Amino acid sequence: MTGGLGPSAAARRNPGHTIAISHAAETWVATLGDLEIARSDQALLLSEAGYSPVVYFPPEDVRTESLLPSNTSTHCPFKGDASNWAAEVDGTPTDVGWYYPATFDEVSAIAGYVAFYKGRVFVRASEPTG
């Protein structure tokens, strides 16, 4: 899969701003209140200079039927333009996650993957079964 946006000009201008993407060991779970909205053993871990690591879930492992498309978006000069997912929180649609439909080449592995806003969705490694 290619990013689709070409190389990031911001990455060229800021070579010290590193982004590393790796397979997130273990099975990861995202919950919104009591509702499990994602579970995956194929999640990716994105570590970006100056930020806490973020777990990105493959789209097929996210229960998008429990989410609402959002009209809001954000821009990252290192990753691209993100679209948001929302959920009803206390009766109000609230952005709870984001994904990059297309990315800069350097981070193409996360294109389409979904991450969740800390403090709105609880993301954790799953308890071992057995």
Image (cartoon, rainbow, N blue to C red):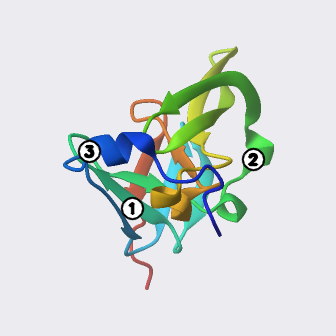
> Do labels 1 and 2 touch, CB within 8 Å?
no
Which part of the image, by quadrant, shows the N terminus? Answer: bottom right
Amino acid beneath label 2: Thr
Which residue is label 1 attached to? Answer: 45
| Above or below for 72 versus 17 | above
Amino acid beneath label 3: Ser
Label 1 – label 2 distance at C-alpha: 20 Å
Which residue is label 3 attached to? Answer: 52
Which part of the image, by quadrant, shows the C terminus? Answer: bottom left
> Along the horizontal axis of the image, is 37 left or right of 45?
right
Q: Secondary structure at mark 1?
A: strand
Q: Secondary structure at mark 2?
A: helix
Residue at the spot x=43%, y=42% of the render? 9
Residue found at the far bottom of this picture: 130
Q: Position of residue 123 (x, y in %)?
A: 43, 49
Instruction: Between label 1 and label 2, give the one nearer the viewer.
Output: 1
- Residue 78 in sight: no
- Residue 64 numbered mark, or none: 2
Front-most of residues 48 and 13: 13
Instruction: Between label 2 and label 3, give the one nearer the viewer.
Output: 3
> Along the horizontal axis of the image, is 107 left or right of 1?
left
Q: Position of residue 55 (x, y in %)?
A: 43, 55
| Above or below for 127 versus 90 | below
Amino acid beneath label 1: Leu
Q: Earlier in the sequence, mark 1 or mark 2?
A: 1
Residue found at the far right of this picture: 65
Residue at the spot x=37%, y=75% of the render? 25
| Above or below for 80 versus 28 | above
Residue at the spot x=57%, y=62% of the render? 39
| Above or below for 17 versus 127 | above
For disc 3, the neighbor class at 10 Å (few under 14, some 14 to 19, many from 20) is few
